[in-house]
Image (spheres, rainbow, N blue to C red):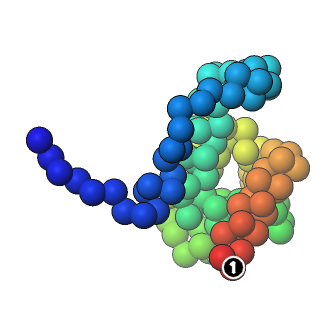
Amino acid sequence: MCNIEMTEIEKEDICQCNIIHNDKICQVCKGISSDEALTNTAELFKVLSDPTRLKIINALILSEMCVCDLTELLQMTQPVISYHLKTLRQLHLVKTRRNGKTVFYSLDDEHVHNVFYQGLMHAQEEK
């Protein structure tokens, strides 16, 4: 048998009683998201957990850009940038526009912009 003592912080996180609040459970059940929606959201956050992809999104917030521009800006190779753009495109975070031989990338919609800035603002908060 293992004898592990809980720290004071861990003790604070555990209820000291065994009361089920059925009214709250019923209220939350009515509004909780589906497993599919939560799985898709987890995939979104997984894709956004990469700093290179966040740099690409940050750049595309500021301007539509082609792969050549992004490789120069981020000082990375074209295959690396293309790989990240493909991943972002698969989750509908960026879209393309062709102009002759050049393919320009931009954010798919305003939600991407909002998610990026909300995350950035949260990360920069002083605790």
Query: Which residue type does callout 1 highlight?
Result: Glu
Q: Where residue 32 sits in the image (x, y, percent)?
A: 73, 26
Q: Is residue 99 visible?
A: no
Q: Residue furthest left?
A: 1
Classify residue 84 as left or right of residue 22: left
Residue nearer the viewer, 15 or 67: 15
Residue position for label 1? 126
Classify residue 63 as left or right of residue 10: right
Q: Residue furthest front?
A: 17
Please give the name of the residue rendered at 62% of the width and 22% of the height, measured from the top-left corner: 35
Q: Is residue 16 visible?
A: yes
Please give the name of the residue rendered at 76% of the width and 69% of the height, measured from the top-left corner: 121
Whether residue 85 is situated above or below residue 34 in the rendered picture: below
Secondary structure of the residue carrying tag 1 is loop
In the picture, the quarter occupied by the N terminus is: top left
Please give the name of the residue rendered at 58% of the width and 38% of the height, measured from the top-left corner: 43
Q: Where residue 101 sits in the image (x, y, percent)?
A: 74, 51
Whether residue 79 is situated above or below residue 108 in the rendered picture: below
Residue nearer the viewer, 9 or 108: 9
How crowded is the residue under tag 1: few (<14 C-alpha within 10 Å), some, or many (20+)?
few
Q: Where residue 47 sits in the image (x, y, percent)?
A: 57, 47
Q: Where residue 123 sits in the image (x, y, percent)?
A: 66, 69
Q: Residue furthest right?
A: 110
Whether residue 84 is situated above or below residue 31 in the rendered picture: below
Please give the name of the residue rendered at 63% of the width and 42% of the height, measured from the top-left corner: 44
Count of numbered circles on the image: 1
Classify residue 46 as left or right of residue 25: left
In the picture, the quarter occupied by the C terminus is: bottom right
